[in-house]
Image (tube, rainbow, N blue to C red):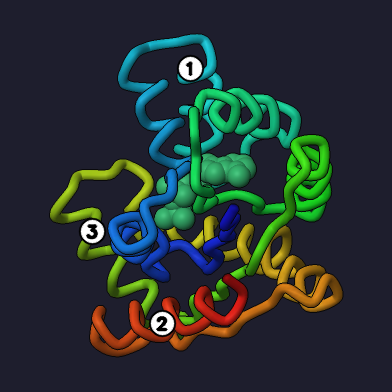
Amino acid sequence: MLNIVIFGAPGSGKGTQSERIVAQYGINHISTGDVLRAEIKNGTELGKTAKGYIDQGQLLPDNLIIDMLAAKLDSFKDSKGVIFDGFPRTIAQAEALKQMLAERGQKVSVMLDLDVPEDELMKRLILRGQQSGRADDNEETIKKRLVVYHSQTAPLIEWYKNEGLYAHINGLGALETITADICKAIDAVK
Ligand code: ADP
């Protein structure tokens, strides 16, 4: 089983690279952001709660996200592995993921840190907002999301280094080059 955590600031290319990894390795993909946007679109209770946090650029409470992730994980049948995109985003979530996988006789194989400079992140997110109309891709909310990233999510870099699972990926450059670097890191742990 290949359990990959794809990590990085908002706009670092997690979603784009995840699609390529899924195509290459035939594993399942969980994007917490995509799941939450689908809940919002469907008008569910979770969606209503999620919208409030997302519009403010804040993270949802850990327990909500952890329960949502466990349910999604158990919905996969005959899985070859999973790429976790947008999760974990806090130390508590990383600990929950470790436990959740251990209960299923599994573990995280590697954490890929897509590293992109802040000015480039800002440019990409503003462009994405103009093209996709994603409500949280406006300058004010992007700034809040980057603050949240630095305070709550970036500490996971040290956490995964301590676990011996960290792989640095240069997230700047041609899409194909980044995918090739990612595949190298995955193949090294396969
Ligand atoms: P980004 O481009 O910021 O990485 P995502 O699509 O992954 O965007 O997530 C959008 C929003 O959904 C986040 O800003 C946050 O409000 C919420 N969210 C997604 N994943 C999580 C998580 N693991 N924990 C808490 N909130 C989350």
Image height of 27 relative to 51, above or below: below
For the residues marked 1 and 3, what is the alpha-carbon distance in whole angstroms? 23 Å
Q: Residue at x 53, y 57 (%)?
A: 145
Amino acid bearing label 1: Lys
The front one of 62 and 125 is: 62
Q: Nearer the viewer, mark 1 or mark 2?
A: 2
Q: Nearer the viewer, mark 2 or mark 3?
A: 2
- Name the secondary structure under disc 3: helix
The front one of 12 and 17 is: 17
Q: Residue at x 41, y 21 (%)?
A: 39
Left or right of 15? Residue 32 is right
Image height of 110 relative to 18, above or below: below
- Name the secondary structure under disc 2: loop
Left or right of 175? Residue 37 is right
Q: Quadrant of the C terminus?
A: bottom right
Amino acid bearing label 2: Gly
Where residue 61 appears, as percent x and y from the top left, is 70, 33
The front one of 55 and 15 is: 15
Question: For residue 104, which quarter of the picture?
Answer: top right
The answer, for residue 59, to whether it is visible in the render is no
Q: Residue at x 83, y 49 (%)?
A: 95
Residue under label 2: 171
Q: Residue at x 54, y 57 (%)?
A: 144
Tell me: is circle 1 under 8 Å from ligand 1.
Answer: no
Where residue 136 appears, as percent x and y from the top left, is 38, 46
Residue under label 1: 48
Contact between labelled residues 2 and 1, with CB atoms less than 8 Å apart: no
Residue under label 3: 128
First reached walking from the N terminus: tag 2 or tag 3: 3
The front one of 120 and 68 is: 68
Q: Residues within 10 Å of mark 3 (few under 14, many from 20)?
A: some
